[in-house]
Amino acid sequence: MADAVQAVDAYDTVFAYSRAGRRAVCAGGDGPPTPVARERLRYEVGSATKTATVLLLARLHHEGRLSWLDPALTHLTPRHPLGDRPATLLHLATHTSGLPRLPPDLYPAVITDRCTNPYAGYPAARLVAAFVRASARPRHRPGARWRYSNFGAAVLGQALAAGSDTDWNTLLAGHILTPLGMSDSGTRPSGPGTDAVGHRKDGRTPVPPLLAAGFSPAGALRATPHDLLTYLEAHLHPERHGPGALADALRAVRQPMLRRGLGHRHIHSATWFVTPTRHGVAYSHGGATCGQQAFLGFRPETDTAVVGLTTRRFTARDPFMATALTLLTDPP
């Protein structure tokens, strides 16, 4: 783990590891010492937030409050006509809704504010309006094609909130974060001394905390390394949270749902990327914000979980993701 930290060129880097319930955390970085130990700070996990949003969907499904197969429009705009084959909540969860990666009217903000807060000016109401427009003329028929979509994941979270008559932040805290014991996690910035500070690709220029607005269900989660290990350990041992809807949901999100890519070689559950390895199947999801990057992964056969966090937005050639995946797939 120390070698893994050393391999990552960033102000702050943390790798956290759990094996059969025993934990180890290793932190370091090129930046000055932080006022609070790096392993106690909350980090932005970006798109790994989607795993929590889909877990929330699974829990609400098993509670009978809604169904995987509900059309999303039914919860967001009940009076709107559904059309021949509307996108369901499951389509949104599995990136098969036919939606593009982002709404077309968001791209100008992404281009001008991609190093600060491109989502900050895009509230939930605007997101829902964009979804209604996209639903009228989808690029692909829902269920026909896999295409990774931040747009779809954000719509999913807002549909769950609308169907529960609350906001997504409150719904996630009450049904996922608090029941799992993730007391040092949240979806809004808390300020210096609590949240890690992200940096641009140069590794030196700080960026402001992420403000995700309507896109919060796709990327707003912030958590400490130990809270993220708690989250992954729950996926390794659903029985510790049951019997009940939460345990059922933790089992459900591990089940293979679809294949994609050339020869259908890539496997996905409802939310996790599934990779066969020498030592059993590995589940993983990465995430990035304007100034931070995260990796979450677990492998049930060896009772192993790995969290990687860093305060720098990397390019594809940087070693962070490959280093984290190696810790998960090549055990000692």
Image (cartoon, rainbow, N blue to C red):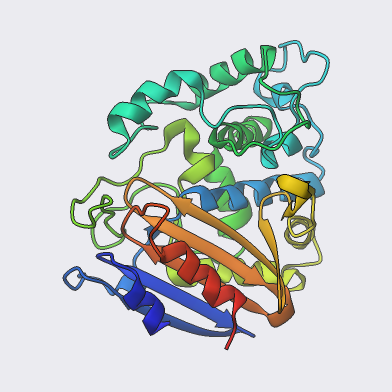
Percent coordinates x, y for residue 94 in the rendering: 70, 42
Q: Position of residue 97 (x, y in %)?
A: 70, 30
Q: Position of residue 41 (x, y in %)?
A: 34, 66
The residue under the point 64% across, 31% down is 159
Q: Is residue 138 above or below residue 63?
A: above
Q: Quadrant of the C terminus?
A: bottom right
- Tell me: residue 301, above or below residue 202: below
In the image, taking residue 107 as reference, residue 87 lies left or right, namely right
* Position above or below: 56 against 102: below
Query: In screen coordinates, is 188 left or right of 127?
Result: left
Is any atom of residue 260 visible in this view?
A: no
Residue 228, compared with residue 124, is above or below; it is: below
Specify whether residue 75 is in view.
Answer: yes
Report the residue at 35% width, 25% height from top. 109
Tell which residue pokes out farthest to the front in this image: 262
Q: Nearer the viewer, residue 182 or 311?
A: 311
**Residue 252 horizontal side relative to residue 320, left or right:** right
Q: Quadrant of residue 64?
A: top right
The residue lying toward the viewer, choosing from 142 and 45, is 142
When asked about the image quadrant of residue 130, the answer is top right
Q: Nearer the viewer, residue 324 or 315?
A: 315
Which quarter shows the N terminus?
Answer: bottom left
Q: Residue at x 28, y 75 (%)?
A: 37
